[in-house]
Image: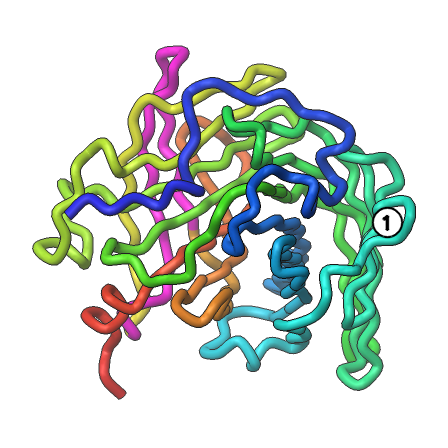
Amino acid sequence: MSETIEWTKSGKAFGTPSPDDDFYHGRNLPNKHFEMTETWFWNFYEEKSNMHGFIHIWTHPNLKLCTAGIFCHFGHKREQLAAEIFDFRNFTPDEIFDADGNITLANGLKVTFLEPTQKMRVEYENKDRDFKLDMVQTAVQPAILRANNQHFEQTMRSVGAVVYEGKEYAFDNLSIRDRSWGENRQEEGHKIPPYTWMNGAFSEDFAFTIAGLDDPKLNPDWAGLYDIPESMLLSDAWIYDHGKHIRLTRLSKITTRAEDGLRPLRTVIDCDTDDGRSFQLIGEVTASLPWHSWQNAMCHCGLTRWTSPQFDNVGWGETQEVQWNDWIAKMAKPV
């Protein structure tokens, strides 16, 4: 078995960013399939309180639909609705853009592109949950596009605050957003182990995004259940180091999970880069939420503290691990 998910893949080259990449491509794209999607993602966090926030906007342009919202939580949660705030709308029109391309969601969340691909403000208030978010994200690194020019990630300086139940959680830190358009995202389940998308920033000069599967040679929890060739382990990855865009030539990672058999706790990454270096990155998930991003998938979203023998300081970022029915049915511990 060697099933692949095409929209997670990238070639070895990099694409070319455009100032228009923040704006809706929508039904102007040549892809007219109903599964064609377009997404925006931002996160925010405050590491001392283990506050982890998540904004996701997901449209199906050819269906004229938008699924989008926000969640924010402190520490680890058993269920998505255990978040201190969870406010998503699944079936709304994709008419969320004003004449300047800014976004207003059905739940009131606003994204104003102050300078496209460089600076944006995000505002949201939910009086019933006594929750308010106001932040500005400013690029500290260029948008790093996949070779197909349909997906990018970008390291941002995120400055703002959450006010929840009268207490303010101010933050000024680095976070990595992403954006995609024009590719089909199939909703069926996949007979593969969990796929993990991870990012982190140690400074304004060094950040990474690494996505792939655990290494069968490291005896993952699914050993013996799936036959995964080495060529499948790495889906997409980049390292940004003092202005250089670097690709990985090898990935080996292993995940440690919680007692439920599902929730990621820790990931150790060993990798080689195309400029001849090797890195080890160790991620400890400090806050997590299991999000049903769509019905046939579970995405464990988590704030992650990164350390490395190559760095004296600590980095912060995301662990987002997607799991499907075949693996969960085999691995979830019974109640």
**99 and 44: which one is in front?**
99
Q: Quadrant of residue 174?
A: top right
- Work out whether residue 198 or residue 299 is closer to the camera in this orientation and state it: 299
Q: Is residue 79 left or right of residue 155?
A: left
Colour mode of the rendering:
rainbow
Q: Using the rendered view, name the quadrant where residue 95 is placed.
A: bottom right
- Residue found farthest to the left: 224
Answer whether residue 48 is magenta in the image.
no
Q: Residue at x 40, y 65 (%)?
A: 297
Measured as percent of width and height from the top left, residue 170 is found at 79, 58
Q: Is residue 168 visible?
A: no
Q: Residue furthest top?
A: 275
Query: Which type of secondary structure does the marked residue at label 1 adopt?
Result: strand
Q: Residue at x 52, y 64 (%)?
A: 287
Q: Is residue 124 above or below residue 173?
A: below
Task: Say which amino acid is labelled 1.
Answer: Thr
Q: Is residue 294 above or below residue 80?
A: above
Which residue is at 57% across, 34% downward?
150
Residue range of the region highlighted in magenta in the rendering? 260-283
Is 266 left, or right, of 151 in this rendering? left
Q: Which residue carries the number 1 mark?
A: 112
